[in-house]
Image (cartoon, rainbow, N blue to C red):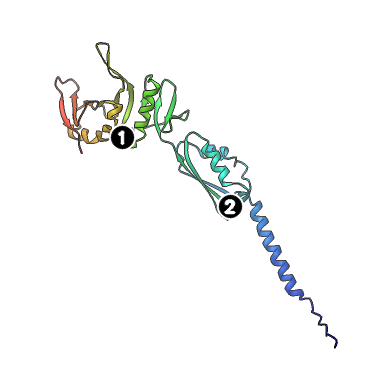
Amino acid sequence: MTKKVVKRKLNVKALLVMLLTIYLIGMIIYYLFTMPIKRIIINGNNLLTDNDIITTASLTDYPPIFRTSSNEIKKKIEQLDIVKEATVSKSIKGTLTITIEEEIVLFYNKPTEKYYLSNMQQVEITSLTGVPTLINYTPSNILENLIKKMKLTNKDILSSVSEIKYSPDIKNEVMIDENRFILSMNDGNTVHINIANFDKLEQYKKLFAVIGEEKKGTFYLDGIGTNILFKEYGAEGEDKVELPE
């Protein structure tokens, strides 16, 4: 018994559809693979310029977006001392979004003419407003402890400080407190404070409210306990103020 051989006709239409589909998929992949970055959005930068970030990330030539590693961009940007963290995302429309979290600028160190950051790095940046100035030399170990305390202090409180002066308490050539600082406040008051009691500065606005805006003087926050001494400029006596809860 002979087997009947069935010849199948080539479905040209189906083949063309398949080839066209493969071609279109290939073109889409090629387009995405070679599509340059069309737009760069940068968020969260206050101290660094957009150009600083784009240059650091090697994006000045707007390279192909999907051939550019987000992780590599992130690593390059985070090498900048002022950057705490960076996140990078891409969109299929060719938009690259970079979000920056910068380190906090704590104060301007006048002796070194640099700004101190919350990560203890010193950087040279454009002059800033609302940042305290450390006006004199401070031993490195004490400076390090000051930074640790300041980075935990509310930004609004820090911005109310105009000048910081390292002023150890010495009486009769005996060191009483080597960790003392004198703060000049923007409102005209003065604050004596040390490292151990630096957290009391968080209560400054409440203390100021208790004393009243009409009085100007010195708050002594370097003592022990919750009682705060306040001496009005030109007055002989001192007032005791209870540290607010």
| Quadrant of the rendered image containing residue 198 | top left
Say whether disc 1 or disc 2 marks the residue closer to the N-terminus: 2
Q: What's the residue at 32%, 29% (across, down)?
A: 161
Which element carries disc 2, helix, strand or loop? loop
The residue under the point 51% across, 38% down is 78
Q: Quadrant of the C terminus?
A: top left
Task: Decide if residue 185 is on the left or right side of residue 211.
Answer: right
Secondary element at image label 1: helix
Q: Is residue 110 depicted above or below 158 in this figure?
A: above
Q: In this view, does 62 lie above or below 166?
A: below
* Residue under pointer 2: 94
Q: In which quarter of the image is the N terminus?
A: bottom right
Q: Residue at x 53, y 39 (%)?
A: 77
Picture residue at 20% right of the left edge, 30% below the top: 225
- Name the residue at the front extreme: 1
Q: Where is residue 61 in the image (x, y as percent from the top left)?
A: 63, 42
* Disc 2 crowd, CA 10 A, few/some/many (<14, 14-19, 20+): some
- Residue 40 x, y percent position in the rendering: 55, 46
Q: What residue type is labelled 1?
A: Ile
In the displayed image of the protein, which residue is found farthest to the bottom?
1
Which residue position is annotated with label 1?
A: 157
Q: Residue 61 carries which label?
A: none
